[in-house]
Each structure stands twice: as C-alpha cells, then as structure tokens.
Amino acid sequence: MDLTVTQGESVAIVGPSGTGKTTLLNILNGLLQPDAGKLEVFGRDTATLGANGWARWRRNHIATVFQDANLIPTLSLGRNVAFRSALAGCPDVEGERAIMDALGIGRLMDRYPDEVSGGERQRGAIAAAFAMKPRLLLADEPTGSLDEASSQRVAELLFGGIRERQLTAVIATHNLEFARQCDRVLQLSGGRLRPVSDRDAPPT
Ligand SMILES: Nc1ncnc2c1ncn2[C@@H]1O[C@H](COP(=O)(O)OP(=O)(O)O)[C@@H](O)[C@H]1O
Ligand SMILES: [Mg+2]
C-alpha cells in the first residue's frame, strides 16, 4: 500500500468491513507499528524520531476521533477538551469554549460523557481534536455508532471544521456521501488503495 497525503488535503478511505481501514489509521496514529515499510509524517521518517520523539509528536500534533469511547468518562466534556489541549501544549480556555459553542455543545461543558447523547459525545471528541490544533486529524468511522440524523449533523460539523481550519485529514467511513466532502476518496480493497473516480486521482 502506498499513500501520500499533501499538507492541507483531506482524504477519505472507504471500503467494506475488514479491509484494513482501522489498521491503516492506527499505523498513522502510532497505535500499531507496520511490519514493513516506512511512515513519513510532515517529511520526517517516524523511525528516525525514536519511540519518545514519535510519541511526543503524536501527542502534540495528531488528533484521532474514534467511532466511540474517545472521551475520559470521569471528566466532564469541558475538562476532556481542556485535558487534550493541555497535553498538546496549547491550553486556551476561550478558544476551547468557542470550539464547543461552534459544535453546539457549549451548554454541556459540565456534563459527563455518559450524561449526553451519542452525537453530543462525538461532538465532544471532535471538539477535543480541534482544540489540540492538530497538524494531522484522523477519524475512524466517526459517525459509525450514530443514528441517521445525528450522523448528518456530526459529519457536517466535522467536515466543516476540517475545511475551515484547512486541516490535513484522513477519515475512514462507510458513508460515500460523507466521503465525498473530502478532497479525495480512496477505496481500500485487497490491500490496495484506488481512487473512487477520476476526480479523486492524485494531482500529477
Ligand atoms: N489486532 C489484530 N490482530 C490481528 N488481526 C487483526 C487485528 N485487528 C484487525 N485485524 C484483522 O485485520 C483485518 C482488517 O481489520 P480492520 O483494520 O479493523 O478493518 P476495517 O477497519 O476496514 O473494518 C481484518 O481481517 C481483521 O480481522
Ligand atoms: Mg474499522
């Protein structure tokens, strides 16, 4: 598999269950190590960063939104967001408040993850991801555990936020309609990535 993502570009990875979307994303966020091959992030071979250097880089610069369970259950939504940005070294109380307001969860700052709906929890996870001002945003089926209406709303806020911030993003999704909101859509199957249409072919 070969994948190059340009800075500021958003790429959607589509494909049926079990084809390796999560494995790919977890290699990109450092949860898994590839058996072979090379991962370069913003021009640096991650193998040369050393384990600690790569861990620090991820903590500061890579945000991952999972399908669910992205938040610390014993912290309120507001504190989850603050914790994430503090870890990344960019705490900013007003900025975090503005992000949560824009995602429609400002009034839920003091609620705990199990006191809000699934869609609100995902918006909390997205707020935490945006608040760390990531250089790379990864999302694995970010709407996968939500009903139709919440999915639409969460996708709108996620893709809107990515565009607004011109984030470099890689997003795995089953939903081709959501995928189309990214600059490029790639289908993963048989261990290969292929553009879904000519429009999605990489720039030459
Ligand atoms: N930790 C693991 N160890 C071994 N095989 C795994 C592991 N995680 C996933 N797999 C297998 O790797 C393949 C790809 O899984 P996954 O990346 O989760 O696919 P997707 O996210 O596209 O559904 C599947 O066949 C899955 O069973
Ligand atoms: Mg998966």
Image: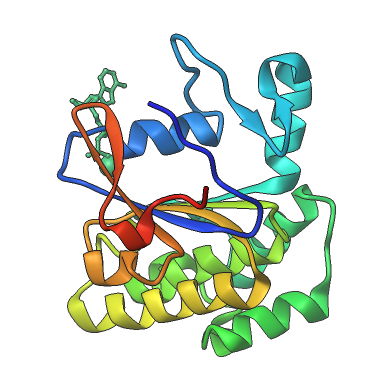
Ligand 1: image quarter? top left
- Please tell me which residue lies in front, 199 or 183: 199
**Residue 74 versus residue 61: which sits nearer the camera?**
61
Q: In which quadrant of the rendered view does residue 53 lie?
A: top right
> In the image, 97: left or right of 129?
right
Above or below, comparing residue 39 to residue 59 in the picture: above
> Could you tell me how many numbered marks the image carries?
0
Colour mapping: rainbow
Q: Relative to the observer, which residue lies in front, 52 or 35?
A: 35
**In the image, what residue occupies the spot 75% across and 45% down?**
60
**At 25% from the left edge and 54% from the top edge, which residue is drawn?**
196
The residue sitting at the top extreme is 36
Q: Position of residue 200 (x, y in %)?
A: 37, 57
Q: Using the rendered image of the protein, determine whether residue 116 is visible from the camera's viewpoint.
A: no
Asked whether the viewer can see residue 87, the reply is yes
Q: Position of residue 137 (x, y in %)?
A: 57, 54
**Image-based side of 138 in relation to 40, left or right:** left
Q: Classify residue 58 by image quadrant.
A: top right
Q: Residue at x 56, y 18 (%)?
A: 38
Please state the horizontal and vertical placement of residue 130, each as a whole percent of the image: 64, 66
38 to 183, vertically: above or below: above
Residue found at the very far front of the displayed protein: 204
Left or right: 93, with 204 as reference point: right
Q: Residue at x 28, y 31 (%)?
A: 192
| Left or right, 60 with reference to 64 | right
Quadrant showing the N terminus: top left
Q: Give x and y (percent) for residue 40.
A: 64, 28
- Which picture quadrant has residue 49? top right
